[in-house]
Structure formats: structure tokens, C-alpha cells
Amino acid sequence: MSIIEKLNAIKSSVPHYWPIGSFIHHNPLKGFEDMHFKDGLAHAKSIFGGKVYMDSSYFMGLYKEGKIDIQKIESNLQYFLDTNKLEIDLDLAKHFLMEVSPQWNELRIQFFHKQEEIDTDLYTHLEKNSIFSDDKAWLQKLIKHMTLYEINDALFGGDAKDTIEKNIIEFVSRFLDEDQTTFSMPNRELGMFEAFKLYENFTYEKDVASFVEEALKTLQVKDVEAYFLTHLLKLHGWAGFIKYRSEDSDYARQQEHPSSLLEYMAVRLYAEVQAVKKKKLRDFSMFEAHAKNKLSDVILQLLKHKNILSGSALDALEANEETSSILKGHIKSELTLDALQIQHASDVLKCERSLTDLAIIIEKLKEEEGYIWLKALEDSYIKEYVDKFTTYEVEEEKQPLATATFCLDVRSEIIRKSIENTGAYTTYGAGGFLGIPIAFVEFDKAHEEFLAPAIIKPKNVVFEIPKESSEAYRAKKGITKTTKKVLSDLKNNPYTPFITVEAIGWLFGINLFGKTFLPQRTNKLFAKMKAQKPKTTYTLDKLSDEKIEFYVHKLHTKMIARYLDTHLDEEFSKEDIDQVWRYLVFKDPLMLDISTKMIEKLSIEYQITPKDYDFQKNKLAMVGFTLEEKVHYLKKYLTMIGQVDNFPEFVTIIGHGSVSDNNPFESALDCGACGGSISLPNTRALCMIANMKVVREKLKDEAGITIPDNTKFLPGMHITTTDIISFYDTDILSDEELKRFSQVAKDFNEASFASRGKRAKLLPYTNTDKDVMIKSMDWSEPRPEWGLANNMGVFVGPRSSSQHLDMENRYFMHSYDSRIDNEEAAILTGIFNGPLVVGEWINLEHYFSTVDNHIYGAGSKVYHNIVAKVGVFSGNYSDLKIGLPTQSVYLEGKAYHEPVRLLTFIEAPLAKVLKAVEHSLAQPFVLNEWIRPIVIDKEAKKVYSYEYGAFIVIKELDI
Amino acid sequence: MSAIIVLLLAGGVPYYLLLEKFTPLKSKHIFLLSGLLLLGAVVSSLYIPSGHTTSIVVIALISAIFSIYRATKTTNFYKLGYYLVFVNAPFFLLFEDQGAEYSLSLLLSLIGVFLTAQFYEKNYGSANYHHITGITLATPCIGTYLAFYLIALALYPPFPNSIFFLSYIFESEPSVLWYIVVSTIFFGNFLLAMRVMRKTLFGRENPTIHYVHMTVKEKIIHSIVIVLLLTLSVLGLKEMLL
């Protein structure tokens, strides 16, 4: 295996990291999804350490609140006992799980200073089965995931680790910087390793793979793969980001400043080799020899380093007592405590079994208890919601005044219900990108955003262009831009900050005091000062070949003209420029007297080449949609949500986004199905397509879906922080239609107010409507909204099955009518491929950020600083924080988010669900139970749950 | 002769080196003994007018520097406690009778450290704090009390140690020895207190430890120590201002 292959073999263990600007919720253990959930978590625990389930005491709290059904605990325990062939009484196991386990650590430690008699058999059993009996295995366990410099630190003192990690973070953050700093690192275009060589001022002629190989040889590393993993785990956030960049060929910054995990590894190994040169142990062979001679001492120092050495042993070490006797004392003390723990547990359980037997049972129960509790909690919710989704009275369908489609996001649930309560409105749910993935170029912006789930690469580019004069906007924007630039220059120039603060520092006080004491008024004031975007429209039609040719020609010739103008005194005619272009792109003869050097520059630096010509043409060919594509996307959307007839006069499609202040994680509150951006462009594009006469005609011919002429599709935008809904493109309505639509807007406004009232009860320190509104502009607010926290499940089915329920924004809700779907379940497969994948990522990101925020989350927002414009770190240097901040999932030290796997309720015949699973990208995580699928099959009158590798009937329906 | 007795009582020579080798005596006992001897020095300084020669102060200073070094090698509260007595001895000797109030403040802060050490010993098996990390979040009560004692020892206001320290500095005439003693004591105390803070007050909680909260009785005792420290602060402030 080559070095690269060895690195590739372990890189799936590194969590993916997306830049914070377009925050993508993701499963940090995505690389483990080919294993069963339980096995994957056990494997992750062995790599990352930390917790993968909540503690027993947490689950006991939920049990006491009535959220966990005792029968579900019993059935899961019984299954565990049966499969493990443990011949013990269910009551004993239950007793252990519910009474002993929550106080397990206390039982071990709280009595340790008391002298108690220890059962000899139990002690011998524990001794025989402990790792202490095998010194070598113990040593290997202790140095697992330790680098050589850490081992040196642990054995001989020192802080090489701090210095090395700090230096690496400094280099990596500067190399990966995306315009946060004003003093960029030079030579980044050479690539990470080449730039590092210049940064550290050393030369190395061969390639990076050879460098890594030589460094590993110098350190005498035996298990290279394990050592790579050890290094990557030191800063797994940064490693995850480098991995993401290197795997995304479209990531512009990666093209500008290439980096790879191998180069990152070279940087790390260089630092290690340099550091250990001055240390006592310069390679692993030396460590092995040292460990062989002074095994007790080495183990004791490692235990001390890991903070697992008892106080008395530490005292003995300080007093320079003999290390072998200290170690013996430590082992004895540990085994005594283990034995006492079992003895105390036996007392609590009033167990008559031998203590050795009990120890074996407890060991197995402790291994499984997290999963048993989790599954019991999920099963309890499944039972509750299966009853709720299948017990309701069917109301007669009325012709709605308007329909509204929201994103399936959990935050749409309360607002949808509020809208339905205000009048004759029908609501639908769909993935925020509406099945129409687009690369969107916003008006006045130069870059494109992918508005689709992160796994889908859009094939259609949409430009936002003004449909009225934009001069006023540009003028105001120009002033703002210039002011910002001047202020930024004054701030960042080495000589001017002091004068700037003295002269105009007070101006910033307006913002500071205004936002603190009068947030609403200050917000209004600054909003007025902002340039108002003119009315815009989208480029939805394909460009003709002639136009594409024209635009590419124009782009290239403009660049050539500008270059020649600035570098030569002569004047060139259009024909001359065209001749140069033809020479560069088509290799036509060049009759002009232009130096070869200049031609080379145009070709290399300005990229005017046949390759770029093709690239630009292909790019422009992606602009807009063909008629077939338009019809395809509209049909896909309508059939996906089941809105194929009975169209009202107004069909609204409402995207969503979030507004908050001083919040680096703002994008995490936007639409997950749109790659962490707002979903308004998708809704506007789809509405524009749906309003096209030619599209409707073709849709009618091809799919038999008739949209009446008087039906108007109108896009809207739901701000999830304030629940305000605004509508766009209403200028397509006549005065009469506008009058009728104003009633709809009024009702939606009322619904917003009602929704805020309900949400105020869920948000902390929020009582009134005003409190909810202020959260979106308060710069000290750590929770502008709860976002997707406390998400629990997804319901895929008709709205009639969930309309009667209050689900407190805990469910993703996707409309789906299985009757419309074909035998191959194409629609359901589409839902599985996009929204379900995103739902699983969101759910598991919240799960892991809650169970161990230190490892899988981002820690407290209070200490966060933005780094390199790609993420946050704690304080002035740390690993790049993955996952969610504590404040997003915890409230006052207690978990607000209830970590459960996504309870996926699908109202459809089982056969169709099986087809969808078979055909979809979701197959691995469905079959490996990273979500909990529940099928409500009304045709078969059965409800199935996917458990232990099969769909089992959990309820017979009486309908 | 009286100077040598005071030198011994105040901890001017590192007699703990002998006591540490005497097995029946544990660090807890050495702490108590050195504390009591210092108290004896404080009391005696009120009755016996004394003037200490430069050589006595220099001996105490060498002992202090050595004790700072020893203190950086321990993570046991008892040991740290008596090392701090020796670290501060030159101050007592340099400022003669004025050093008594400072030493009294030091003793009071060390009583707090002693009580904390007892708490650790009772609940975690030893007064060693190396592995008892992050108590500010895990057990905020003992964390807060310990923070007060360490702030006092680190010579931060409003605790009396800093007030008396500052007061004597302002009142006395500086000399080369003065500069050395003042800077040694100031940085010695500060760095040693910060070292403990970093290790046991802050950082992540240790998952292998079962953290124990204080009882009401313990809280009352610690509160009394804090009240006494603050009372001394008021007295010190009065002395400084009047």
C-alpha cells in the first residue's frame, strides 16, 4: 500500500466540515454509516473517546417525566437478554438499569475511603479480566492516539504539544484564510506543502509523499495508518475542512490555494520531527527500549498525564517512592474500587447471585445500556405518534382560498398550523429547494451559490437581474462600499488605528448603545440607510448558441483590450483584438506585432485559452432551463407534494431564512435543503416557471395536470426568527387579484402573530411578541431562535394525517400522496434522496452535539472567534469547531435537544417504501438503522417498524 | 540569638527538608507545624523588638527561592501550604514588626488552603489536586472558596495580603535587597497561585472523578475564614488611608 492509499484508508473517520458561511448540518460520523448504528457508535467511541449516548441519569429523568414507557424498557431489555443468552431475571436487569446505573460512578467512588471487606473471588475475577494483568496491552492502550511528542511530554514533562499545535493552527489558519486577514500569506498558490517550506525556510526536492514517508521512517512508526489517524484526530476540525476542500473540485479557494490531507500530514510530521530532535525519545524504537527498561515508571507517568492516577499514587510519585510498588498500589486500589462498586450494586439490587456472576452481567449491561435506553425512548415516541397519526377524523375537503407550500423544516410546523387556523388554507411541505437545484448568482454579486442539498450539484445557473433602474441602488451601494473600504483601511493600516479611534470612534458608539438599549429603533435606522435592491427577475430561459458565442467572445476580447491598452502605447482596433483572440483560442494566424511574452501572459495569467473558451461556453450553456426541464421540475414538484388538481386562485410557495445579529452560525438557521442558504431564489424560480403559459400547456399534455389560467403562483419568504412572511413578484397580479390576495396576506400576517405567541412559550426568557422580534436584532442573544433543536422525526404523507396535531416544531413534514406515485416509487425515492438525507444529517448533528458537545459540538459561543472566515475556534487558537454550539442544544446546563434518531414516519404501502429504500442514496443509513423508519400502510392496515434488520408489524390498524 | 529564633520560627530556613525525611510526619503535620511556628513568630514580634541583619534576610531569601522551586514540583495542597510559609519568610524578616500583619493574612489564607486540602483528602483520598480538574464548574462552592484563597495568596486586592503588602512597600525605603525580596515574593506568590488555579480550578472536568459538593458545615467554616480575611482587609485599608 502506498502512503496515499494508507491515508485514504483512514480518512473516512475524519468528520466532514463545511465552511460556516454556508453551514451544512451533517452527521459527524458519516464515515461510519456502513456499520450498524450501534456498532458505528462503539467504533467512534474507540477512536474519538467521549460519549455516544446520554447518561442513564438523563434517561431516568425522561422516564420520570413520563416520556419513556416502562413496557418499552422491558421489551428492549428482554431482547438484549435473549440475544446475549443471559439467564437472568428481567426484574434484576431492569432494577440495575433504572436504579443502579444512574448512580454507578457514585457507587464506585463515594465509599472509597471507608475500609470494607472485599470478596476474594470477585477480586480475583476482576484481576484476571482486567487490562492490568497484561502490561504490554495496557501500555499500548495508554499510548493509543498519542504522538511521539506527546509521549515525551508525558514522560519527561514539557509542553511541546501546546507549542506544536499552536504553530500548526497558525500556519493552517493563515494558509486557508479566505480574506479575513489584511496581510495574506504569500505563495499560497504553490500549494500547502510548498508554501510551508517557504514559511519554515527549508528545502526539500522530492514530492510530498516522499517527505511523509521519510518522516515516518525517521520516527520509526510501525502502524502508519493508525499514526495518520492519531495525527488527524489532534485537530480533527481543521483536518475535516482540508478533507472537504480537497474533495470538492468546485471549491474556488481550493483551486486558488490547493491543499490536501497528505500535505497537512507533511506539515504535522515536519513539526513533530523537529520537536523530537531535542527530546529524549527521538523515535518509537527509543520509546520501546525505554518502556522495556522502565515499564512501571512509563505507565505511571502516562496515567498521570491522562489524569487517571489517584491522589495517593501521585503523592508517592512526588516522594520518589519505588515505581513498581506505586503501580502495584494503584492497581490494587483500582481493583478494590471496582470490587466495591459491584458489592455496593449487589447491596442495592439485593441480589442473591454470586458477585462474580453479577460482575459479568453488569459488564454486558453497561456496554449496551445507552442503546437500550435510547431505543426505549424512541419506541415510546413511536408508539405515541403512531396512535396520533392514525387516530383522527377525516374532514371534508373544501376549495381553499389559497395554498401555501413551506419547507419541510421543523420550524414550519407551527406557522403552517397557524395559517390553517386562520381560514380556508391548505398547506404543504417539501424540501426547501423544491426539487429544483440551482446555481444562483444574486444581483450585484459575482459568485454563484448552490441552492440544493450538499449532495446534489446543480446543472442550471440562474442569474438575478434588475427589471427596473438600478442606478439609485448602485449609487447608494457605492457610497456604503467606499465608506466601508475607508474605515477598513484606516483600521488595518499600522499607523492609523489610533487616530481613527480618536477621531471617529464615537460614531461606532451609536451602533453600540443603539443596539444595546434601543435595538428596534436602531435596526430601523440602519435599514433605512441600506441601499434598497431594485425589483428583479431571473434568467430562466436558455441562451442560444449565438448568444453564448457572443458573450464568451465579449468577455475574452474585453480582457485582451484592457491588457494591451495598459501594456502597449499603440491603439488596437476591434479587428486586431479579435485577431489576437482567434490566435489564442483557435490558433488562427496572427499578423500583429505583439511579443511572445505578452501572448504567453494572456494565455497563462488571463487564461484566454481554448480550454477556457470551452469552459465559458459550457458554463453559459448552463444558464436557464429548456422547456422540457421547466416542465420536468414543475411536474416533479407538484407530484412530489401531491398538489395535482383542485388548484386555488393563489398558490403560494414560501421559502425561508433566518435573521440574527452577531451570530457566526446564522447560516445554520437557514435552509438545510438549500445548502445553508435562504430558499427564496428556488421558490421565485419555480413560481416564475409555473406561471409560464407554455409550461402549463406542456404540463397538461404530458402529465395531465391542468393548472387553471386564473391560478397564480406567488413566492414568499418566511423569516423563522420572527415568523414574518413577505410575498414577492406580486406585480404579476391585476388590481382585482391584488385586492383578493391582500386578504390572504392579512391572514398570513395574523398567523405570524399567533405563531410568535406559541414560540414565545418555547423560547427561554421570552414572554411577549416584542421579545421574539428583538431576538433577531439583539447582538448579545445566543439563541435568536431554537432553530432545528429538539427535532425528533419526519412525517412523509398527506397533511390530513398530521393536521390535528400540535408537534411543537419537532417534526419535518413532507407532503406525499402515495396514490400518485408509480410502482417504482419514483417520487418517494426522490424524497429519500434529498430531504431525508438532509433530515438525517440535521438530526444526527444535533444528536452528537448534545451527547458530547466537546468532541462533536462547537463548545460555548461565548469564547468563539471567527477564523479565516471558514469557521470558529475557541479563544485565540484552537481546533476548528465542528458541530453546534452548546447554546444551540443546551439550556442552563441541561440538554434542550432530546437526542433520538430521526423517527421517519412514512404513510405509504410497504412495497413502495421498500422500492424507495432499494433505489435511494439513503439505503445504507436506513438499513443500518441510523434513522428509525416506520411505515403506516393504510392499504394493508398495518404499521411497520424497521428493527433488527427487518420490517416488523407494530400495530394493526382498525380503519 | 533572637534573630535566629525568629528566622526559624518564620520559616527562614527550609527545615521541612529534614521533616519530610522523618517518615512518621506527613505533609499535613509539617503544614500545621510551620503554620504554628509562624504564628509564634508573629506573636513574638509583638513583644520582642527585633531588627534583623541583612544576612538573616538573605538566608530567608535563598530559602524562599528554593521553596518556590519546590512548590512548582508539587501538586499537593499541604505541601504547597507550607512551602508558601517559607516563600513569604523574607518579607516578615525584612519588614520586621510590620511583617506581622502580612503574615497574619498569609496564615489566614493558608488556613483556607488547609481546609481545602482536608476537603480533598476526605473526598478524593489525598490532598493532591493534579487530577481534580475543573472544579469551578463541577463543584462551584469549593471552587469559589479556593479561588478566594488563591486570589489572596496571589496578592490581588481586596484581600489583606495585597493591602498589607502594598502598604509596607509604600511606607518603606527601597534598597537593592528590598527590590529583590519584594519582586521574589510578589512573583513567587502570584505564579504559584496561578499554577494551582490553572490546574484545579479551570480546565475540563475529569470524567474519572466523582466530584463531591461541600456540606453546610464546611461552607460555614470557609465563610468564616473569608469574613476574617475581609475584616483584615478593612483594617489594612484603614491603616493605609489614615
Image: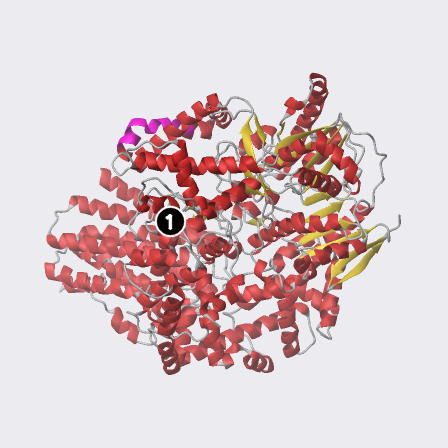
Residue drawn at point x = 77 percent, y = 37 percent = A643
Q: How many marks?
A: 1
Which of the pair A679/A297 is nearer the observer?
A679
Check disc 1 and give the amino acid type: Asn
Vertical arrangement, residue A330 with respect to residue B153, above or below: below
User: Quick one: SS at disc 1?
Assistant: loop
Vertical arrangement, residue A889 with respect to residue A627, above or below: below
Residue drawn at point x = 17 percent, y = 52 percent = B95
Q: Mark 1 packing: few (<14 Cα in 10 Å), some, or many (20+)?
A: few
Which of the pair A41/A198 is nearer the observer?
A198
Residue that carries the numbered disc 1 in the rendered image: A876
Residue A363 seen in the current view = yes
Q: Principal SS element in the magenta part?
A: helix
Residue drawn at point x = 61 percent, y = 52 percent = A841
Q: Which quarter of the picture shows residue B83?
A: bottom left
Residue drawn at point x = 62 percent, y = 66 percent = A39
